[in-house]
Amino acid sequence: MKKKILVIACGAIARELVRVSRLNEWQHIEFQCLPPELHNRPEQIPAAVRAKIKSQAGDFEKTFVAYADCGTGGELDKVLDEFGIERIAGAHCYEFYAGSNNFKALANDEPGSFYLTDFLVRHFDRLVIKGLAMDRLPQLIPVYFGNYQRLVYLAQTGSQELQGLAKQYAEFLQLEYCYKFFGDDPLSECLKPALENQA
């Protein structure tokens, strides 16, 4: 028997998707995540999503994509239009983690903000420091971050450990530190219209 909905998602939001699914008792959904390293290679996201869609063709009644545009410059939407598939609205995951209105307020308050989520705090060393070669070439730090003024940690959990790490990373990048707790509710509200209509 087919599961009703396949959700193709970014691996960077996997933990949150599991929590939101349990919270809403979504037993009709299967999540399949793509590598979170695609965060650093957004030009590869559309092809990866297309390949996943094709590999699962006919196995589900509906497919939904749990990516925002994520730096693809509209290319992801072109792929999804080919298949008539919807995605989470917004430009990037920071918007659906905070909620659109909250995120717009943060961006307006300080346009030069660099955002972290729980996932990015956990994997900052691998994805940001090493991923952008700043461990080997520290002179790249001002090249990448010279136009930023602050680091904003958009927290999904209240982890003191992650807050401590986020502060350290703000210091490493020589940015002002700002902590904002939003939990899982904004992501849940973004997903409900697409995922509950077939529950």
Image: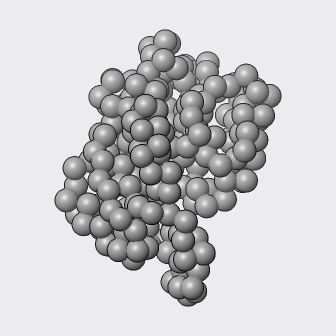
Q: Quadrant of residue 122?
A: bottom left
Residue 114 visible in this rendered orientation of the protein: yes
Q: Quadrant of the C terminus?
A: top left
Q: Extreme left residue here? A: 160
178 shown above or below 156: below
For the point 49% across and 12% down, which residue is it?
Answer: 197
Q: Is residue 43 left or right of residue 23?
A: right
For the point 68% across and 25% down, which residue is it?
Answer: 85
Horizontal and vertical percent for residue 100? 46, 32
Render colour scheme: one colour
40 shown above or below 24: below
Q: Quadrant of the N terminus?
A: top right
For the point 26% across and 60% down, which residue is it?
Answer: 163
For the point 60% across and 30% down, which residue is it?
Answer: 87
Residue 18 visible in this rendered orientation of the protein: no
Horizontal and vertical percent for residue 105? 42, 38
Camera-side residue of 150 and 46? 150
Horizontal and vertical percent for residue 192? 44, 21
Horizontal and vertical percent for residue 198? 50, 12
Q: Is residue 13 left or right of residue 184?
A: right
102 shown above or below 61: below
Camera-side residue of 56 and 123? 123
Q: Quadrant of residue 147?
A: bottom right
